[in-house]
Amino acid sequence: MKFFIDTANIDDITEANALGILDGVTTNPSLMAKEGITGQQNILNHYIDICNIVDGPVSAEVIATDFEGMVSEGEHLSGLHKNIVVKVPMTLEGIKAIKHFSSKGIKTNCTLIFSAGQALIAAKAGASYVSPFLGRLDDISSNGLDLIAQIRLIYDNYAYDTEILAASVRHPMHIIHCAEIGSDVMTGPLKAIKALANHPLTTSGLEQFLADHAKGNS
Ligand code: E4P
């Protein structure tokens, strides 16, 4: 499973990239605003900065909601760097835009996926990735993992190339369950990625090894 980090924070992206297990980055307008990145040119420059850190797909979201606006914005974003993936919201206008981008060889990430039907039409339009929002479904007492399993089944039935990018990941167990289901990618915060390395028996075992080594070498 590929690991993307879901942030616009340069320090977190740099730290995750240094681990050597990072495959890409996803951002969204809220994450950009959280980092205080405002204004068209600053936002575009920030995407380029991210692309210069991570050698992998970097999702950059369009703000336009109409087909023409999405096409013009998306083509501009994709021209910024070879690794930019144009993030398009799941709407009918978005589906038309994804079909357009797909015919031009521009990669897309269809975002705000909350149902299998949405994932199905995004795949038919030629989306490179679909982003089911796992955590936001869990937040409303719906099962986000069940949705990912349903999309996996549908895509496997028809050998769709669209990759399932589990988004809105909140904690390490989300990541593990996504890997069990066969999600192609997960995108989550640095904290959830780093938490995968933790186990109290690893910590105590290492302390014991070091203490025993110190005793034998004192
Ligand atoms: C997906 O690409 C989104 O950026 C993201 O995963 C949303 O996560 P949230 O529900 O934690 O805001």
Image (tube, grey):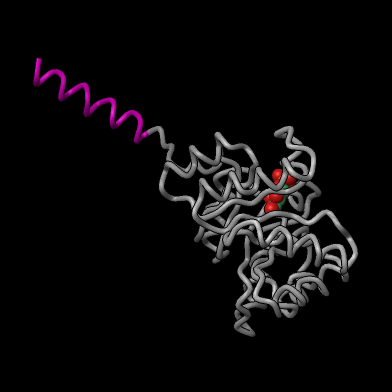
Q: Where is residue 50 shown, x and y percent of the image? A: 58, 46
* The image quarter in which residue 163 lies: bottom right
Does residue 217 belong to the magenta stretch?
yes
Q: Camera-side residue: 208 or 52? A: 52
Specify the quadrant of the image occupied by residue 118: bottom right
Nearer to me, 207 or 131: 131
The image shows residue 147 at horizontal and vertical percentages of: 71, 64
Q: Residue at x 78, y 66 (%)?
A: 115
In the displayed structure image, the side of residue 67 where residue 81 appears, left or right? left
Q: Position of residue 214 (x, y in %)?
A: 16, 19
Residue 217 x/y as whole percent: 9, 19
Quadrant for the C terminus in the image: top left
Please report the residue visible at 63 percent of the width from the left and 80 percent of the height from the top: 160
Q: Is residue 12 left or right of residue 98?
A: left
- The vertical placement of 80 against 218, above or below, is below
Residue range in magenta is 201-218
